[in-house]
Amino acid sequence: MSRIASTFNALAEAGKTALIPYITAGDPQPDATVGFMHAMVEAGADIIELGVPFSDPMADGPVIQAACERALAHNVSLQQVLAMVKAFRERDNDTPVVLMGYVNPFEVMGYARFVKAATAAGVDGVIAVDLPPEEADTLLPLFRQAGLDLVFLLAPTSSLQRIQKICAVAGGFVYYVSLKGVTGAASLNLDDVRDKVARIRSQTKLPVGVGFGIKDAVTAQQVGRFADAVVVGSAIVRHIAANPADPGQAQQAIVELLGGMRAALDEKEAGEPTASAG
Amino acid sequence: MSKAAENITNYHVYPDASGHFGFYGGRFVAETLMQPVEELAAAYQRFREDPEFLDELDRDLADYVGRPSPLYFAPRLTEHAGGAKIYLKREDLNHTGAHKINNTVGQALLAKRMKKTRLIAETGAGQHGVATATVAARLGLQCVVYMGEEDIARQSPNVYRMRLMGAEVVAVKSGSRTLKDALNEAMRDWVTNVDDTFYIIGTVAGPHPYPAMVRDFQAVIGRETRRQLQDHEGCLPDALVACVGGGSNAMGLFYPFLNDASVELYGVEAAGEGLESGRHAAPLSAGKPGVLHGNRTYLMESADGQIIETHSVSAGLDYPGVGPEHAWLKDTGRAHYVTVTDQEALDAFHRLSRLEGIIPALETSHALAYATRLAAKMQPEKKLVVNLSGRGDKDINTVAGIEGISI
């Protein structure tokens, strides 16, 4: 069983919601990333979503755009990102790592070579934001063969037909983009998200994660009541942006934010949201 | 990868149903945009064969844009080149001064029928932004144009024109602050406002159906050229020349001739300071295939797949990608893609101004520079048509600045 599947199974048994933080690899500098990853796991992260920096992050808001620019100022390449995952695996062989990026760097490396290198590095899944299933005919069989999960996004605009089409090929979990917009955008409408997640659940047995618009322990807890996973990106990256020259300071703030979210998620049955550091 | 299609007899059946031109094109967008893109494709499919829609489009092109644009025989430029007869397809005489309006008129009619109330666009040189602001004003629609901060500085007259017509011009400060970043920002706007917003892409790029739809709206250029040259000379042209940034004016001229094997097609990319300098904007000539802005095509990119900054004296050619149909025409060998440097374009800018009394856009000057070179190698009985895609008024500050003249 893949790390992603066994992680979700264990969480389901314990009645817990997965906490999935996102950082951009190499932000603010390449040597900070592996430390951030370990610290996030210690603070309660169940899966790490690691952004592959791209020059033209069309689905991202200003916070993650700036993170890509900071990483690319150090010329962080896909190969280096994979090396970071490999380094992370030296001390952590259990926490799933999902790469999130745009398809061009994967395509330029060559799909076959990428799949081989990602598997060797210890990557478990990949989200290619601009690769809908219609364009994934070449990549999907390579992923299946290697036991890697190609994780797909679903959006508020996805029709039932598209939900079915995507769930039929999706691996690992399904990532519901909770709002029409870019990462780090305004507030999500909880009732809409809950309804849509229920609709997705009726079409797949895969765990359903929710991302975009989760900024603090309160929203994490609210969404955690009906989702299998919450994904937090811009709220974390903001702390890195605030401390570009001091990764230690950034790490401390990230740990506090995630700790608050973890506690809030674990208390979700208790009802009242926990105050957080976010 | 299977790139070149072999033995193509009919170029007019592409793209396929999923928007692919062979290996190129497609729909590489985030999931949120898949539904609006499919909705647009369905609407376009319906209206492109709707006689009422086509009548309204033809009327607008005649009465508002001023079509047909003339096909002008350029005697002194022909004499200067000393070879083939050079004809100029005068898209610079359209309302707003460039070919861009052919497409925005068409897409705006589509937006109206789809009941969208807000138009957005990206622009580089500002010509497409102006053409979008124009149709938005005419239809009473809200309009937001994204433009790179650097382009705003070098194309200030167009920025003012857009604002005069009521458009909001948003300065894009991310990335290289040029056309590609304006496109990113327009995509981000669209993903946020999909319900009421129609994104008018200005070139033959983006997710399907844009490359085919923009080409079809621009193909009026080639259809007229075909008829007009028949009237003038009683024959088909021997060669067509057009500049290629995203490639909409070239696609519009080429498309009706794709199945005429005797007509040679030349797309002219910006070599900037020279291909060897690395400071250019010539993905077809010096780039490699990749995925950007919703389609697979030739790109200017690093070995790691990052999009690299381009350079051209002409803001409208300063783009690291190109329409996927051009990528495919290159691989199939149907069209030739060549380059012209900043300096050659500037020389051609002056040459046409002096010889024919026509000040061309800097984008167009690239096509003119190559056409003059090409005509010189052709026999005098041959006929060459250059797409004079835009007028140069917007560029006079840039040219004067380069030459140290203050105006």
Image: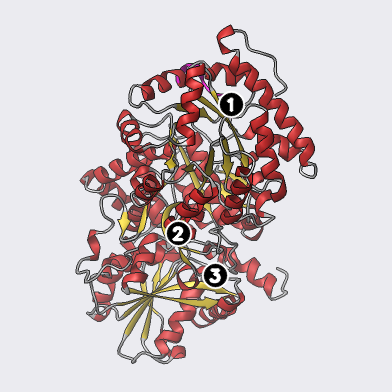
Q: Amino acid at mark 1?
A: Ile
**Gap between marks 1 and 2 measured at Cα:** 34 Å
* Residue visible at 39% across and 44% down in the picture: B108
Foreground pick, B88 / A199:
A199
Measured from the top left, where is residue A254 in percent x and y? 70, 31
Residue B370 vertical position relative to residue A156 in the rendered view, above or below: below
Q: Chain under label 2?
A: A
Q: Earlier in the sequence, mark 1 or mark 2?
A: 2
Residue A157 visible in rendering: yes
Measured from the top left, where is residue A109 in percent x and y? 49, 59
Judged by depth in the image, the label closer to the viewer, 1 or 3, is 1
Judged by depth in the image, the label closer to the viewer, 2 or 3, is 2
Kindly identify which numbered label has been placed on residue A110.
2
**Mark 1 closeness class: few <14, some 14–19, many ≥20 residues within 10 Å:** many
Q: Chain under label 3?
A: B
Residue identified by numbered label 1: A214
Image quadrant holding the N terminus of chain B, namely bottom left
Start and end of the magenta stretch?
Answer: A186-192
Image quadrant holding the C terminus of chain B, namely bottom right
Residue B138 visible in rendering: no
Residue identified by numbered label 3: B362
Task: Look at the numbered disc 1 and give the secondary structure of its residue.
Answer: loop
Q: Is residue A178 left or right of residue B398?
A: left
**Mark 3 closeness class: few <14, some 14–19, many ≥20 residues within 10 Å:** many
Measured from the top left, where is residue A17 in percent x and y? 53, 21
Judged by depth in the image, the label closer to the viewer, 1 or 2, is 2
Q: Amino acid at mark 2?
A: Gly
